[in-house]
Amino acid sequence: MRSTPARRIAGIALATAAGVVALVGPAFAHVTVQPGNAQQGGYTAVDFRVPNESDTASTVKLEVSLPMDHPLASVRTLPLPGWTATLEKSKLDKPIKVHGSDVNEAVSKITWTADPGTKIAAGQFQEFRVSLGPLPTDTESLTFKALQSYDNGEVVRWIDEAKEGQPEPAKPAPVLTLTKAPAAAGASPAADGHHAAATASQDSAAQASSSANDSTARVLGVVGIVVGVIGAGVGFLGLRRKGDSAAS
């Protein structure tokens, strides 16, 4: 049987674990963008993941604002049964170039509205899929402010932006982190070819040098063995002569 102190320790550990879970749990209930990262300059498909946080109401609308300081020329929604998606466009202050053409307007807001009989009920979540691109190359993240509406009239505003060195806000906006594309191996192909040739030449030289050193070592080893054998033979002959002289 466990001792009373052991039981107390186990009880404290369980209570602490439960407290940690209780504190961490709500953090996973935020509206987020999944996956949370994509590559600069490319196209990607992401899901806006929306959990229902209410025990008494259901989510019936999601509004996502797209960043107009880094407009996205191509925005497409994946059809979702039971939901109607509406895209709003805004005129850009400065056109952006996409595949050599000027783009003067971009999607600034996407609204998903639940059809009658459709909802995100308590204990459920829904994902709203969107194709985006081309992603900007001059920023490390895109922030998508979102509004989550419930059928009881409540609206939760996921619009707070996290600040470095400060705790996460209570209602953080979904953020897509952008990573740089892999480096293209340096300079021009010709330079790469020269570098490869130089490397190959150095490797060949090193191999030749290593081979020469090995050959020299082998030769010296053989010479040493031969000299040792000759020395042993001379010594043996000397001893034999001494023995013969003593016998005579």
Image: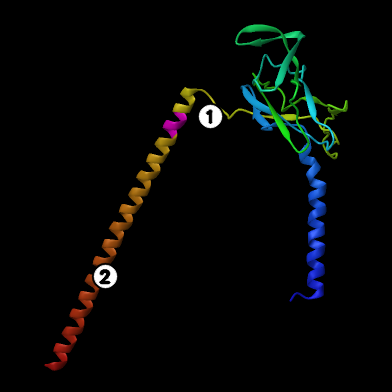
The reply to whether the C-beta atoms of the residues labelled 2 and 1 are less than 8 Å apart is: no
Residue drawn at x 85%, y 40% is 167
Say which quadrant the N terminus sits in: bottom right
Label 2 vs label 1, nearer the camera = 1
Q: Residue at (77%, 33%) from the top-left corner? A: 121
Depth order, front residue of 21/181:
21
Query: Is 160 left or right of 83, judged from the image as shown?
Result: right
Judge whether residue 196 is colored magenta.
yes
Q: Which mark is residue 185?
A: 1
Residue 32 is situated, as x and y percent measured from the top left of the image, at 74, 32
Q: Quadrant of residue 234?
A: bottom left
Give neighbour class at mark 2: few <14, some 14-19, many 20+ (Cα, 10 Å). few
- The image shows residue 5, relative to residue 146, as above or below, that is below
**Which residue is nearer to you in this view: 218 or 244?**
218
Image spot of residue 35 (x, y percent): 66, 32
Q: Nearer the viewer, residue 79 or 43?
A: 79
Q: Amino acid at mark 1?
A: Ala
By secondary structure, the bulk of the magenta-drawn segment is best described as: helix
The residue range painted magenta reads 194-198
On screen, 248 above or below 158? Answer: below
Q: Name the mark on residue 3.
A: none
Judged left or right of residue 243, residue 214 is right
**Where's residue 131, x and y in %?**
64, 21
Q: Residue furthest front?
A: 117
Q: Which residue is painted at 54% across and 25% down in the image? A: 187
Given the image, on which type of amino acid does mark 2 rest? Gly
Q: Residue under circle 2?
A: 228
